[in-house]
Amino acid sequence: MRYLFQGDSITDCGRAGYEDPQAMGSGFPRLLEAELTAGAEECVVMNCGISGSRVVDLLARWRKDCLNLKPDVLTILVGVNDVWHELLSGNGVEPGLFEKVYRILLEETAAALPGVRIILMGAYVTPGTSTREHWEMFESQVKLRRDITQKLAEEFGLEYIDLQEVFDRAGRELPPERWTVDGVHPTAAGHGLIAGAWKEQWKSGQPAQAHFQGAEI
């Protein structure tokens, strides 16, 4: 079984080298690798998240960093930089283009990797040092990308994890800074939240094929 995690800095989380898909970083993919590889099945866990990636950046490297790796299970988290880059440098990705490009990614994946199990994770944002100044825009614009992601998951019959709901629920128990460093990048506890949500989805989601029923986590 080959697992691939794709996305931006949340997935990246300090990977040692972008030419090595098994450079795992220290975030939620690493936490999941520890459990996935402890199972009896043959298992390869890969991380191709790259800090700063927008959906258009994923498209530019999709063949090398996804299709050529032939994952059996693909997880994608993207969307916050499509907003954040607009605020920082006027180089974001507006919602219409975000949807078009994301759809291309999914269409190419379906054509090249029939039967792959795909889990889409919705972008999230919390109050923090990097988000409070432009909170209304962050919250509303990230929601637009999250809604598009959920819409595409439904359209393509894919699994979907609402990470905003996960972080909102946790934020009602403990302050936001317990879960993210700056409103976007997770703390160790925040990565634990994402890993936990992924495991719940893995257990509850209906596998596309029998051979996806492997990991007991």
Image (cartoon, helix red, strand yellow):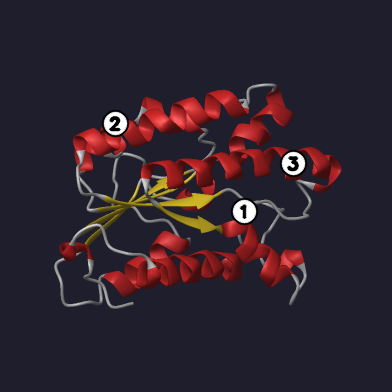
Q: Amino acid at mark 2?
A: Glu
Q: Quadrant of the C terminus?
A: bottom left
N-terminal of the pair, mark 1 or mark 2, is 2
Q: Secondary structure at mark 2?
A: helix
Instruction: Give residue 176's position: percent from left, percent from top.
Output: 75, 64
N-terminal of the pair, mark 1 or mark 3, is 3
| As drawn, 196 above or below 62 | below
Would residue 161 be found to the left or right of residue 181 on screen? Answer: left
| As drawn, 211 above or below 59 | below
What residue lies at 50% left-to-right and 35% top-to-bottom? 53
Marks 1 & 3, CB-CB < 8 Å contact: no
Q: Quadrant of residue 61?
A: top left
Q: Quadrant of residue 191?
A: bottom right
Which disc is residue 108 wearing? Answer: 2
As drawn, which residue projects farthest toward the right? 133
Could you classify mark 3 by the number of other residues whose Cα lies within 10 Å: few (under 14), some (14-19), or many (20 or more)? Answer: few
What residue lies at 29% left-to-right and 70% top-to-bottom? 36
